[in-house]
Amino acid sequence: MTPVNHISNDDLVKTFEEMADLLELSGENMFRVRAYRTGAAAIANLSQQLADLLASGHELTEIEGIGSTLAEKSKVILETGRLPQLEKLREEVPPSLRDIMRVPGLGAKKAMKLFQELGVKDLSGLRHACEQGVIASIKGFGEKTQQSILQNLSIVEKAAQRLSIDAADALVTKLRAHFESCPELQRIEFAGSYRRGKETIGDLDILVTSESPNMIMEQFASFPPIQEVLVRGDTKMSVRVSDAFQVDLRVVGPESWGAALQYFTGSKEHNVRIRSMAKAKGFKINEYGLFDAEEESKRIAGAEESEIYQLVDLPWIPPELRENRFEFEADIEQRIASLIHLEHIQGDLHMHTVATDGENTIEEMVAAAKALGYSYLAITDHSKRVSVARGLDAQRLLAQWEEIDAINRLQSKSSNQNQDFWILKGIECDILEDGELDLPDNVLEQADWVTASIHFGQKQTREQITDRIVGALKNPNVHSISHPTGRLISRRAAYEVDMAAVIQAASEYKKCLEINAHPERLDLNDIHAMSAADAGVTLVINTDAHSTSQLCLMKYGITVARRAGIATSQVLNCLDVEALRKRLRR
Ligand code: DGT
Ligand code: CA
Ligand code: CA
Ligand code: ZN
C-alpha cells in the first residue's frame, strides 16, 4: 500500500494530461476527456502531495475535481508507478500526435485525420507533408490551410525551446526556495534574459556566492525537477529540467559578485559596449572583476554591480534597459529617473467579469483592485460579436452600467474622507470585419472608457486591418486600442497591420495604445511601445484580467514598458483618479 517511485503531483498531472489528449485523439467522448483535464488541473493546484494524502489515509475523491475514476487511477499510479490504460492507448495512438494537435488551427480531429490518411505522426512529418504539398489534397484542408499550418509550425517549433515569462517566474520561485534552504548560500540572483525581463527565456542563469561551491552544487543536484545533469565542473553546472529546459549555475566568491552579475545578466551587445568603454579607460573586465589593464592582477572593483558602471562613468543601468538600445545615450540618467515602476500604477483599465467570460463579479474585482492600492478600475467586458464569451448587447451593457452607477454611489456615501474609488463604465468593443464598431455610438458615448479591439477577421489584408484600427481611433467615443497586434506569444502570429500608421493615428487623434500585460500577449511589445512613446502616444498598461488573481499580471506589462524606456508621465493609468477624470472629460 505504500506509494512507490516518489510519484509527484507533477507526474500525475502529466499522466492525466496525456490520457486526455490520447483519448481525445482516439475520438473518445468529450465528457471523459474533460474529466481527465479537470482532474489534472485540480492536482496541479494542490499544495499537498497526493502521495502524502493517500499515505495518511485520505480519500482522493475529497479533492474537488477528482471523481471516483480518477481517484482510482491516481491510486494505481501512486502504488505501481504505472497506468496500464495509458500504456495500451499509446499503442493505438502515437503520443507524438499530441504535438500535432497543438499546432494552432489543427486540433485532435484533424491531427488524427492526417495520421490516418498520410501517416503523419510528428512535427517534422507534418512539415515534410506541407512542403510536399500533399496536405492540400486532403478533404477539408486545402492550399490555404496548408500555408497557415506551415506558418504556425515555425512558431510552435521556436516556442518549444523558450519559456514564457510567467513559467520562468514559477520555476525561479521554486529554485530560490530550494537554494535558500542551504545554509552555505550567501547571495543568489537569476541573471540572463530573465533578469532583463525578456518576454521569453531561452535558458535560466543562476548566480550564487558561497564559500563552498561544492555544497551549492550538491543542493542544486537535488532539485526534484532535474532530469539530467549536463555538465558539472568546480564552479559551474548545467542541468535539464522538465523536458527540455536548461538551467545554468555559476558559483563565485563574494569579491566577484558584482562583476559576475553584470557579465551574466547581459545582453551580450550591452556587455560588448561596456567592455570597450572600460578598455578606453585602461581597465579590463571579465566575470571575476574589473582590473587594471596594465597590471592584470590588480583588482580595482567587482564586489558590487554598481562599481562597474560607476568606473565607466555610467549610472547603474536597470537590467531591463541592457539591450544596447538607448542606455548609452547622454540623457540616460534622467530617463532612468523618470522610468515607470509598478508602484506608480493607480488603476487597471481592462478586465472582464462574470457578465461575459470573467470569473468574478464587479464587486470582487473592485475589492481586489483596492487591495492592490488602486483608486480606479474599468470594467470592460466583451461586446456581442464575441458570442462564445456571451458578449454584451446594448441592453445588457446599459444594465451593467446602471449597476456600476449604483456601486459607485454606494461607495462614495460610505467612503471615509478622501478614499475616492472610481469604477469606470467601460466596454471592450469589437472592431467588426467591415470596420464598424460592435455597438452604436449613442451607447458608446455614455461610457467612461471605451477600448476597441479586433478578435475576428484576423486574416484580412494588411490594408483592411490597418483601416479598421485607424477607423476605430478616429471615432470620438473610442479611447484606446487593446492588444493592438493580436499576437499570442508562441501560439499565433500578429495579424498583418501597419503599426506605423496605427501609431501615427493614435498620436493624431490623441488616443491611447495598450500594453496588454498578460504574459501570453505582451502586446504592444517593447519595440512597438518604444515607437508609440516616441511618437507622443500615451500608453495604458492593462491586465485584461479574467479573474481577481490575474490583476497581479500588471508587473509583466510594467517590464515591457521599462524595456521600452517609458516614463511614468507617458502612461494613462499612472494618473491619479482626479487627473484621470479630468483627462477623460476632455
Ligand atoms: P536567452 O537565454 O537566450 O534567453 O538569453 P540570455 O541573454 O540569457 O543568454 P545566455 O543564457 O546565453 O547568456 C547569459 C548572459 O551571459 C548573456 O546575456 C551575456 C553573458 N554571456 C554569455 N555568453 C557570452 C559570451 O560569449 N560573450 C559575452 N560577452 N557575454 C556572454
Ligand atoms: Ca539565459
Ligand atoms: Ca545560459
Ligand atoms: Zn479583454
Image (cartoon, rainbow, N blue to C red):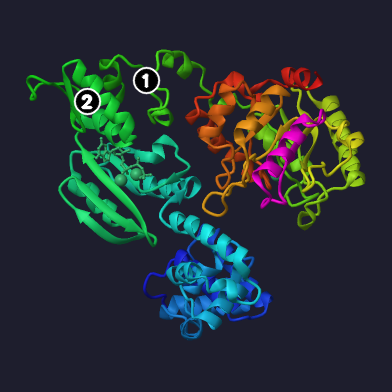
Q: Mark 2 vs mark 1: which is more N-terminal?
A: 2
Where does residue 290 sit, x and y in percent of width and height?
19, 24
Badge 2: how crowded within 10 Å, few (<14), some, or many (20+)?
Answer: many
Residue highlighted by disc 1: 328
Q: How many marks?
A: 2
Residue at 59% of width from left, 27% of height from top?
532
Query: What residue is drawn where x is 42% and y is 50%?
Result: 171
Tell me the kind of residue under disc 2.
Gly
Question: Does mark 1 have its CB less than 8 Å from ligand 1?
Answer: no
Q: In the image, which disc is placed on residue 305?
A: none
Q: Tell me if residue 132 comes above or below residue 153 in the rendering.
A: below
| Residue at 47% in and 79% down | 94
Describe residue 205's horizontal placement relative to residue 522 as left or right. left
Q: Is residue 527 magenta?
A: no
Mark 1 surroundings: few (<14), some (14-19) or many (≥20) residues within 10 A: some
The spot of residue 520 in percent (x, y) is 56, 48
Q: Which residues are magenta?
A: 451-478
Pointer 2: what residue?
302
Q: Quadrant of residue 454?
A: top right
Q: Position of 303 compared to 416: left or right?
A: left
Cα distance, mark 2 to mark 1? 21 Å
Q: Is residue 42 above or below residue 520?
A: below
Please indicate whether residue 168 sits to the left or right of residue 206 in the image.
right
The picture quadrant for ligand 1 comes to top left
Identity, as a three-letter code, of the amino acid under mark 1: Phe
Dot 1 lies on which element?
loop
Which element type, helix, strand or loop, lies under badge 2? loop
Mark nearer the viewer, 2 or 1: 1
**In x, y percent, where is residue 13?**
51, 67
The answer to whether one can see residue 130 in this image is yes
Quadrant into which the C terminus falls: top right
Residues 584 and 55: in front is 584
